[in-house]
Image (tube, grey):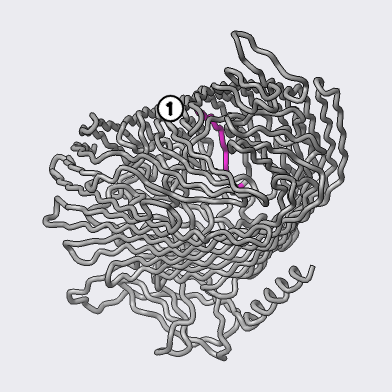
């Protein structure tokens, strides 16, 4: 409570300085009475003083500017190309000012006017693509990463001011529904005029004036109203025989959009990243996930922390069809279908040291894995989104037919693993908002089903002491069959009363899960099953009845949202093998408060407080042992896991589009109270027995983030800085001893994109990490790692460039190969009249053949050696159409 009060006091002190803030608004016209869009409006203390605030008139000529100044008077200036500047001294008070500009008769002599690289229109920031693009940039993702305030994560997710974007539009249409990497990595930068950031974007138009949003979205503005384009690419290389093919036709019009692609390669390019879904769920709602989750797995190597092209041994094929058609005004039909087929290999070794309060255990594993991936993902969406009606129905069907094989050599045995892990899912999600009288009626329905039938075979048999009375045996067989049916349905209404919007909602959800598993001992051609401790036949039924009220307040520069969900939850668990039946009933109240204040034209602050209860599903409640991989066996012979969490967050952000400066900092404090404590029992061979015990415990976490970026227009340079610190404190049972574990993690990052001259550009990324773990009064060695990437591109002519890309990695704990160096060379020649690119690439020039990484947790130290791709040469042709 003290923590919450201090946050609120800090917030009030911060916002108290804004008591003198005034609002000056108006309309800008010409002599003919026509609205002037894009006029520059500035407010200063006097005619020659520094600018206090600024803005740009909108499409209807309107402008509104917030002024934070103690001055009695201010100076207003309006400018527009072709018109005489308009100036006036005003009292520093809320007022409406209408401005009429007259055409200028003054002749302009050799005046060159260059538009600002970042323009602001209300809550929309527009980044001019040509100001950030150089000769090397091909797709819009190449340009986005140079823009201040915008960050593309390694997996493809886009963030603005440190937060994930909510929507990715192309000319205002959401073609890809979260799988926006497909557009980001294929739309030509030459086809894009601007990238727009839609701050505080409410994607449901009918809610625009009723419920605020603190999330941002991104919109791609194309140069042409009708854009038909695409690329076709083919490449060949050697050591071993390499190929790369890609064809991606695209069309964008006002009524139709389509991106179709086929891609194939064995060069280490992970094309599956282009179909990853970064959709964000509705705020404050419990969502049922249909993402693939595996019960079983083979023992895999830790992948290196750098670009997959250096280490991924693949043979991949991807086909994707994404089509949007506007059936009639504001009614869109969308189809997204993708199929992925991939074969991957992993070769390397792992040295693991297990630390227990009484002993140290070492394990060495030489690993060769083969992964077979077959995935079909599809979405079919019908949507109507207008200012007076909203309807969206989304049908999603996914299928996974995956399998894996693994061979491990230890000092004592050769271990073979075979895994079959298929998974299928279907879900239909409906949302409807419709005016009835003076309020909006809301209806939601989310229903789906998932199914999985997985098996793992390990030869020779494992955990002989537990499964076969200590006698060696030939093979262990683990079979797991599971299914989940879920439905969540609710109805409510939304009503605005002046500056307040209330939205009560009542609903119910049901989740029915079934689990069957058996752990068998295969020996002498026969399979036997130990007692019920190694089998599960469980029915898990979870039901929830809820009443939620949402209160939104929006006035001037304040945004306040309060959610007050009241839930009745019931859980019923039955296990036929163990004749076990459990029930649990809970009433929970889980309020959620968010307050945001726009302190000035550049500064925003926010605080939030969330109380939540979490009840796990059948993955954390089964009584019989399940062999999750060859050296991990686990069960949860305990009550239903419950946790109660409190999370408090404070955030301060600054953005100045005029000077291209973006920065933010946030701090999160969270406390979680759990009813179960988990135990890891480490055996002599590194085998881990995992169990849960009923014992209350608490975990505490602190997270501090800082980041900032600035674009220097005169030297065509973007600088990005970041730092993150986290501390996690929790308790754990290790070999029957209760220990307190503290994890400290500190990270610093630096990014630089610069066009040094007409013939040279450079890109740099640096990262420093420090990880420290303390357990039972003992500090383990701190892990320090560095990553440095430097890319130099030379442009001897307008149609060619030569690139040198170098990378350096370091960690202080590896017993060997603490330093790793990489070098790539690339030559690029363009036949401009035919839109043909010719490329020659030499990857891994230095022939670095393996990478050593180090990681640790509360009871293990792991050193992984991963075999890398060899030095290889690739020549390619790329056609644009």
Name the spot of residue 828 as percent of width and height, x first.
17, 47
Quadrant location of the N terminus in the rendered image: bottom right
Q: Is residue 269 left or right of residue 576?
A: left
* Count of residue discs: 1
Does dot 1 land on a helix, a strand or a loop? Answer: strand
Say above or below: 771 vs 627.
below
Which residue is nearer to you in this view: 486 or 188? 486
Q: Give the magenta part as a residue range.
A: 377-387
Q: Which secondary structure type mostly characterizes the magenta part of the structure?
A: strand
Residue at 12% x, 57% y is 796
Which residue is nearer to you in this view: 322 or 107? 322
Asked whether the viewer can see residue 327, the reply is no
Residue at 39% x, 65% y is 118
Name the spot of residue 566 as percent of width and height, x first.
83, 48
Q: Residues within 10 Å of mark 1 (few under 14, many from 20)?
A: many
Say above or below: 698 vs 442.
below
Asked whether the viewer can see residue 452, the reply is yes
Q: Is residue 489 left or right of residue 789?
A: right
Residue at 70% x, 71% y is 7
Query: In the rendered image, which residue does mark 1 sit on?
Result: 370
Name the spot of residue 513 as percent of width and height, x first.
73, 27
Name the spot of residue 230 as percent of width and height, x first.
29, 37
């Amino acid at each position: 409570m003290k923590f919450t009060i201090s946050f609120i006091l800090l917030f009030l002190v911060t916002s108290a300085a804004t008591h003198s803030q005034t609002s000056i608004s108006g309309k800008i016209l010409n002599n003919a009475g026509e609205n002037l869009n894009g006029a520059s409006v500035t407010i200063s203390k006097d005619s020659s003083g520094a600018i206090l605030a600024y803005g740009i008139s909108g499409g209807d000529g309107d402008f509104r500017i917030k002024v934070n100044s103690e001055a009695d008077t201010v100076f207003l200036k309006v400018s527009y190309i072709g018109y005489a500047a308009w100036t006036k001294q005003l009292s520093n008070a809320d007022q409406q000012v209408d401005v009429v500009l007259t055409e200028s008769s003054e002749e302009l002599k050799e005046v060159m006017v260059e538009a600002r690289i970042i323009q602001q229109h209300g809550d929309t920031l527009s980044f001019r693509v040509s100001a950030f693009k150089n000769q090397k940039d091909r797709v819009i993702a190449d340009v986005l990463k140079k823009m201040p305030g915008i960050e593309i994560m390694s997996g493809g997710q886009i963030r603005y001011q440190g937060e994930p974007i909510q929507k990715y539009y192309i000319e205002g249409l959401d073609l890809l529904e979260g799988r926006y990497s497909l557009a980001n990595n294929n739309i030509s930068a030459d086809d894009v005029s601007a990238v727009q950031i839609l701050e505080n974007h409410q994607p449901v138009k009918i809610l625009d004036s009723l419920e605020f949003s603190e999330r941002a979205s991104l919109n791609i503005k194309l140069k042409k109203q009708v854009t038909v384009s695409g690329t076709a690419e083919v490449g060949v290389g050697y050591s071993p025989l390499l190929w790369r093919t890609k064809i991606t036709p695209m069309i964008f019009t006002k009524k139709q959009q389509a991106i179709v692609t086929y891609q194939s390669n064995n060069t280490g390019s992970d094309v599956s990243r282009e179909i990853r879904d970064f959709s964000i769920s509705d705020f404050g709602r419990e969502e049922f996930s249909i993402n693939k989750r595996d019960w079983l797995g083979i023992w895999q190597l830790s992948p290196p922390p750098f670009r997959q092209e250096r280490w991924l041994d693949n043979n991949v094929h991807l086909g994707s069809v994404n089509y949007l058609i506007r059936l009639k005004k504001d009614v869109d039909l969308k189809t997204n279908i993708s199929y992925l087929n991939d074969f991957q290999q992993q070769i390397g070794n792992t040295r693991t040291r297990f630390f227990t309060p009484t002993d140290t255990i070492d394990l060495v594993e030489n690993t060769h894995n083969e992964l077979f991936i077959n995935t079909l993902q599809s979405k079919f969406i019908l949507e109507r989104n207008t200012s007076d009606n909203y309807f969206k129905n989304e049908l999603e069907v996914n299928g996974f037919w995956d399998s894996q094989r693994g061979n491990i050599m230890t000092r004592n045995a050769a271990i073979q693993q075979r895994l079959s892990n298929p998974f299928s899912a279907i879900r239909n999600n409906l949302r409807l908002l419709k005016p009835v009288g003076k309020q909006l009626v809301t209806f939601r329905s989310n229903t789906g089903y998932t199914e999985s039938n997985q098996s793992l075979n390990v030869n020779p048999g494992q955990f002989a002491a537990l499964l076969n009375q200590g006698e060696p045996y030939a093979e262990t067989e683990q079979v797991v069959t599971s299914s989940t049916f879920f439905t969540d349905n609710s109805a409510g209404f939304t009503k605005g009363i002046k500056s307040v919007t209330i939205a009560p909602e009542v609903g119910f959800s049901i989740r029915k899960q079934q689990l069957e598993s058996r752990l068998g001992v295969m020996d002498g051609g026969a399979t036997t099953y130990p007692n019920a401790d190694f089998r599960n036949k469980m029915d898990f039924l979870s039901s929830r009845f809820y009443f939620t009220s949402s209160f939104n307040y929006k006035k001037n520069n304040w945004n306040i949202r309060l959610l007050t969900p009241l839930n009745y939850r019931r859980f019923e668990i039955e296990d036929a093998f163990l004749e076990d039946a459990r029930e649990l009933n809970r009433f929970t109240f889980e309020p959620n408060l968010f307050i945001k204040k726009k302190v000035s034209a550049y500064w925003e602050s926010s605080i939030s407080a969330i109380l939540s209860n979490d009840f796990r599903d059948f993955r954390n409640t089964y009584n019989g042992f399940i062999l999750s991989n060859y050296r991990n066996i686990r069960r949860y012979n305990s009550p239903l896991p419950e946790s109660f969490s409190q999370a408090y967050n404070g955030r301060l952000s600054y953005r100045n589009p005029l000077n291209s400066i973006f920065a933010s900092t946030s701090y999160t404090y969270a406390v979680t109270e759990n009813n179960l404590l988990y135990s890891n029992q480490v055996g002599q061979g590194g085998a881990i027995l995992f169990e849960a015990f009923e014992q209350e415990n608490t975990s505490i976490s602190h997270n501090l983030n800082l980041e900032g970026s600035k674009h220097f227009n005169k030297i065509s340079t973007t600088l990005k800085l970041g730092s993150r610190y986290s501390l996690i404190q929790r308790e754990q049972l290790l070999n029957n001893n209760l220990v307190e574990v503290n994890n400290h993690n500190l990270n610093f990052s630096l990014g630089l994109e610069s066009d040094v001259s007409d013939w040279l550009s450079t890109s740099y990324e640096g990262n420093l990490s420090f990880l420290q773990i303390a357990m039972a009064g003992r500090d383990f060695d701190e892990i320090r790692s560095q990553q440095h990437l430097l890319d130099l591109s030379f442009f001897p002519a307008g149609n060619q460039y030569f690139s040198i890309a170098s990378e350096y990695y370091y960690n202080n704990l590896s017993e060997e190969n603490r330093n790793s160096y990489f070098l790539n060379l690339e030559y690029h020649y363009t036949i401009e009249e035919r839109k043909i690119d010719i490329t020659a690439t030499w990857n891994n020039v230095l022939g670095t053949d393996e990478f050593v990484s180090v990681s640790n947790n509360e009871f293990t130290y792991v050193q992984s050696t991963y075999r890398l791709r060899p030095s290889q040469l690739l020549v390619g042709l790329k056609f644009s159409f």
